[in-house]
Each structure stands twice: as C-alpha cells, then as structure tokens.
Image (cartoon, rainbow, N blue to C red):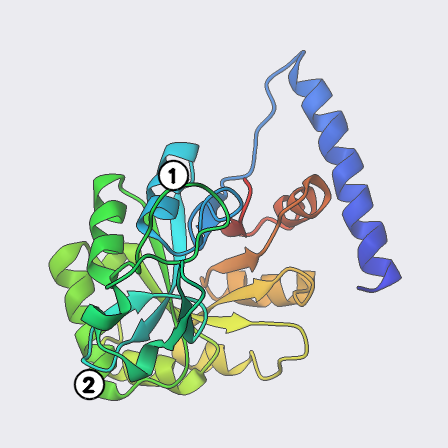
Amino acid sequence: MSFQLILKMLSAFILSIFTAIGGLFMPVETPNVCMIGHRGYSSRYLQNTELAFIQAAKHGSGGAETDIRATSDGIYVTSHNSEAVFEDGSEMQIAEHTYAELTAKPLKNTKTRDTVYLCTLERYLEIMKEYDMVCFIELKGNFSQEQVREIFTICEEKYDLSKCIMQSFEFDNLLKAHEMFPELPLMLTYGEGDEGYERCFEYGFSIDADYKAITEEMIKEFHDRGLEVGLWTANDPISLAYCKSLGVDYIESDVY
C-alpha cells in the first residue's frame, strides 16, 4: 500500500468522524452505497455457507457476494476455495467429487459451533430472494458457455436476473455471459496488479475492484459511462471511510 493511499485513507477517516459529529446537530446527507456481505457475514460465520448468507441479511447487508464452483456431477456450489475442508480434517477437490459425496459430512467450522454443509447456488438464491438482496456471484475459474447458461437459468428460475450481478476475474467468462445475455449486468473482478480494465468499456461491464487497486480516475471513467463500481474488502473503519469517500455504488465487507 502506497504512502499516498495511506494518507488518503486517514484523511477520509478523520473527515468521517467530523461528519458523524456534525450529524448529531444537523442532518447529514450520506452517500447512497449498498453494503455487500463478502461471502456472507464471514467475519462471524463460516464463509459461503447458508448460515453466513442468512446472517448477512439479518446484519443489515444490502446484498451478499459468493463464489461459484461446479461439482463433478454438475451441481453449482458456493465455495471460494477449490477444495472443501471437512470437520474430520479431510479434504475433497470440489470439481472431482459429486455433490452427494461433498455433503456427506459437515464442513470444518472454526467460527461457531453450528453444523454447516456445502451450500448450493439454488439455496443461496432462495435466501437472497427471501430478504430482497443484491447478488454478487463470482465465477471461479473457467466456465464453459453451457455452464454459464445453466447458472443464469438457475438465477432466473430462483430469483430475478436483474438482482444478480455476475462477476469474474476471467474476462472470457464475462464475454460468454454477455454474448447470451447482453442486457444483464456483469462485473469484472479486479485486483492489485491486474491490467486491461479498459476492455470493460467496449462491452459495458462494470467493475468490482480491490479498494487498493482503484483510483478516482478509474471510478470516474466507469461512472461517466453509466457503469457501476464496487470495492472489496473494507474490514476496518479507516478502509470503510475511504471507500465511502470515493462515491462508489457497492462496498464489500466481512464485517460491516
């Protein structure tokens, strides 16, 4: 993290404190930003599980981000990592095992005493629909065109495609989705050291970026084209104040 960025973050945090103090005496207009539970309410509950998604809603998040992988028998599950780690200490590669095999025993849960299992895309969508939440759905790895179509079909059947924003680090995943569903929202997942975000403008893709990788100029480029900007992952008061100061549309957090 650069010294200049640290100064900007501290300045935003100090300003947020004075704004909060001022709000005690007069109304203060707050930016219209949607908070997204990163992998659910993952600071308190095991990430990407049914419990984490439900608790994100109860915590007050406007949406929840998840990661999608496919089992060997074509079931889409919510997992950031390529392997599932179980309560008994064993591991299974998600792509190499069936859904039945992967849910035959509970996941290792170091967050709470709850017994939790691998969650399906369908169950995630049911929770999002129940609480009227925005879905950030990140495709992990390379997906075939047929798989992308299947995921969109599931989203349409279980919820509302307009509330489901498909994301990926893999630009090819976004191109496949755009070819089939050109009117639906898509986002490039963008991290530090990544390049080529300008390709988004050709296809009308929004961006969900590591807050340390974004610049005010980039945000303006997207907003000037009517595209949205999300930032991840603001897990402390200083980074949260900084992200809010940038005037973005979404902020992902494990905590807030």
Mark yes or no: residue 184 visible. Answer: no
Looking at the picture, tell me which residue is in the foreground, 58 or 52: 52
Name the residue type under label 2: Glu
Which residue in the structure is indicated by mark 2?
146
Residue 139: percent from left, percent from top: 37, 74
Disc number for residue 112: none
Q: Tag 1's secondary structure?
A: helix
Q: Nearer the viewer, mark 2 or mark 1?
A: 1
Crowd tier of the residue under label 1, counting other residues whose Cα lies within 10 Å: few below 14, some 14–19, many 20 or above: some
- Quadrant the N terminus occupies: bottom right
Query: With respect to residue 207, does 53 lie above or below?
Result: above
Q: Is residue 86 left or right of residue 13?
A: left
| Earlier sequence position, callout 2 versus callout 1 | 1
Contact? badges 2 and 1 (CB < 8 Å): no
Identify the residue at image location x=61%, y=72%. 191
Identify the residue at image location x=49%, y=45%. 111
Query: With respect to residue 26, does 20 lie above or below?
Result: below
Mark yes or no: residue 48 visible. Answer: yes
Residue 167, picture quadrant? bottom left
Q: Residue furthest right?
A: 3
Residue 162: percent from left, percent from top: 25, 57
Disc number for residue 55: 1
Query: With respect to residue 9, does 86 lie above or below?
Result: below
Q: Residue furthest front?
A: 88
**Residue at mark 2 to residue at mark 1: CA–CA distance:** 32 Å
Q: Tag 2's secondary structure?
A: helix
Residue 156, picture quadrant? bottom left
Residue 20, picture quadrant? top right
Residue 59: percent from left, percent from top: 43, 34
Name the residue type under label 1: Gln
